[in-house]
Image: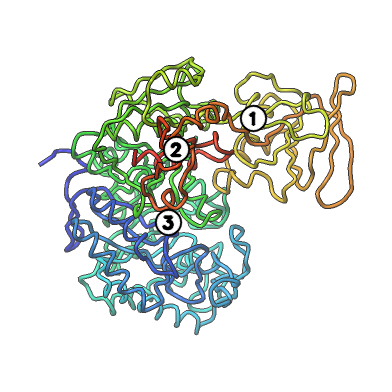
Amino acid sequence: MSKDPLLQPYQLKHLTLKNRIMITSHEPAYPEDGMPKERYRAYHETRARAGVALTMTAGSAAVSRNSPPAFNNILAYKDEVVPWIRELTDACHDHGCAVMIQLTHLGRRTGWNKGDWLPSVSSTMAQEPAHRFFPKLVEDWDIARIIQDYADAAERMKEGGMDGVELEAYGHLMDQFWSPATNHLDGPYGGETLENRMRFSLEVIDAIRKRVGEDFILGIRFTADEAMKGGITAEEGLEIGRRLKATGQIDFLNVIRGHIDTDAALTDVIPVQGMRNAPHLDFAGTVRREIGLPTFHAAKIPDVATARHAIAEGLLDMVGMTRAHMADPLIVRKISEMREEDIRPCVGATYCLDRIYQGGEALCIHNPATGRELTMPHEISPASIKKKVVVVGAGPAGMEAARVASERGHDVVVFEAAPDAGGQVRLTAQSERRREMISIIDWRMDQCLARNVRFNFNTYAEESDVMFENPDAVIVATGGLPHTELLSEGNDLVVSAWDIISCDVKPGRQVLVFDDAGDHAALQAAEMIAKTGAHVEIMTPDRSFSPEVMGMNLVPYMRALQDKDVRFTVTYRLKAARRTGNLMTAVIGTDYSSFTEERDFDQIIVNHATVPLDELYFELKPRSKNLGAVNQEALIFGRPQPLEANPDGDFALYRIGDAVSARNTHAAIYDALRLVKDI
């Protein structure tokens, strides 16, 4: 047996967990009609097959109709959920993986205009800033019904074959009762004493135990320290833990530190890139030591070394690597096979979490197979015939194309005009806070070099270079260049956000950053300029700025900008620019009226996405078998591309990423995977 601490079994009550690695409760928002159907099952089964000991579903499954999901969660209050849960648990159990589910009532962390249009309820009438709705102050008959709902939901989960349930008590109804900051009730559930504030939770636990019996795991994910004025303190959190243990009905604690009622607070609980790894790990160890219950924890534990430390030092009994398993579901298998260097790294971009709210599903920024297990592979199968594949461009799209083609067993050559691989990702990583992004490229470079991919850097590939290689397939991943031709006059006076980020242009002192792309580049440039002490105005024609950055990733930008001389202006559009002495006059309008004004700056920066570098593609197109065409149905459903357009052609030709149109890193890598996996 391996001596690796992570690979040791753990006995949780009657349940033997085969190692110490778990996926904590999270909701990737894959349910259909509130049910965990095929896509949901495939996501968890993939990780179970690769060896994870425990996977937890649904962060969090709703137990009551007046707790409608804030996004696409499992509806645990419906009887029809049982057979779907049974299919999921059976699939995971077949691989020796235990399965649990998180149950909750959201309380004020949801709204009335979802689901059945019932008012949300809480122990307070105060609005939760993150979701903006105002709850009804809960009444005694609400409490009685919700307790019953919890017990009913737990019974459904047991009937569905779950090994246990975890109750959610951070930011949701249970700890809304617990926290002095959010319990404004009178009477037996009122906020004056901890005994009263815990009464609701203890009654829920009693009701569940009576329904599911003693041979069913019951744990709680709880805030042991809200880290906020007037909230649950660390001392009170430990006392809550002691009282939970004293019931004799709780089998494990899953420790959280912080509060989640604002984007900023949530980001401290679940840190993004540029923030410290495992910031709450030692605190979780304190809870384990003080309370003496089996203790789980997850919060930016992205790497095996940190996870191994957590177990080896006795800080945790089970270590959660949830986002890490979105980046690479094969972590446990690769550890067991002593292939840790092959683990695809989590880069902390938190595209997964942010996208749930914006795009309605969790996706990994650089593993497009996550959430698409029904059509996309996590492991690339070898091709039956070895081919020559030429990739032009070594940004994220090109590097993924080269990796996949080389894993197929093909002879791969890459041309790149720059001295290093990376493209826009390398540019992004110029910011200290986003340097983790370069791992997207570094991992692919290591995988390519291990498979003898030939790289030609500092080479601006032309048609003759490609044809010299006598390719069977050509992948054009040449990316794009900043698009600055958007003004009625003065396009020659502006610079791009890329110019600032790359340090090719020195920041001015009075700067306008006009951003209608809404992605990271504008804020990255603004952050760099603001650090010099300059005045920066960030302007967008949209009703909110930087919508593509999304909530959690916006937090570190705001922390870096709001204490500096930075102004945010929405709903105004840069129309034109002209030289006025040593300054530039910006002509500013709006989409809402004929209003215009003029203001002076010494530098105007534009973030207007990119235009494709597609000349080579169009030169090669007439010589290709498919004339560059992509069959969309085959693309969507993961089938091989037909090559029927030009029987006299020499090679298959595809262009991907920003060489097609301005998109993002995930789209570029997804393009590459779904096209190249069948070459």
Q: Are marks 1 and 2 in contact (CB under 8 Å)?
A: no
Q: Which residue is mark 3?
A: 28
Q: Which residue is mark 2?
A: 646
For the residue labelled by badge 1, is the local secondary structure a helix, a strand or a loop? strand
Left or right: residue 124 compared with residue 233: right
Q: Nearer the viewer, residue 4 or 286?
A: 4
Quadrant showing the N terminus: top left
Residue 516 in the image: above or below residue 429: below
Q: Nearer the viewer, residue 632 or 574?
A: 632
Residue 462 in the image: above or below residue 474: above
Question: Of circles 2 and 3, which is in front?
Answer: 2
- Labels 2 and 3: the sequence-earlier one: 3
Residue type beneath disc 3? Pro
Residue 521: where, in percent of width, then height? 61, 34
- What separation in Å lies between label 1 and label 2 (alpha carbons)? 34 Å
Residue 144 in the image: above or below residue 638: below
Q: Is residue 153 visible?
A: yes
| Tag count | 3
Left or right: residue 300 compared with residue 56: right
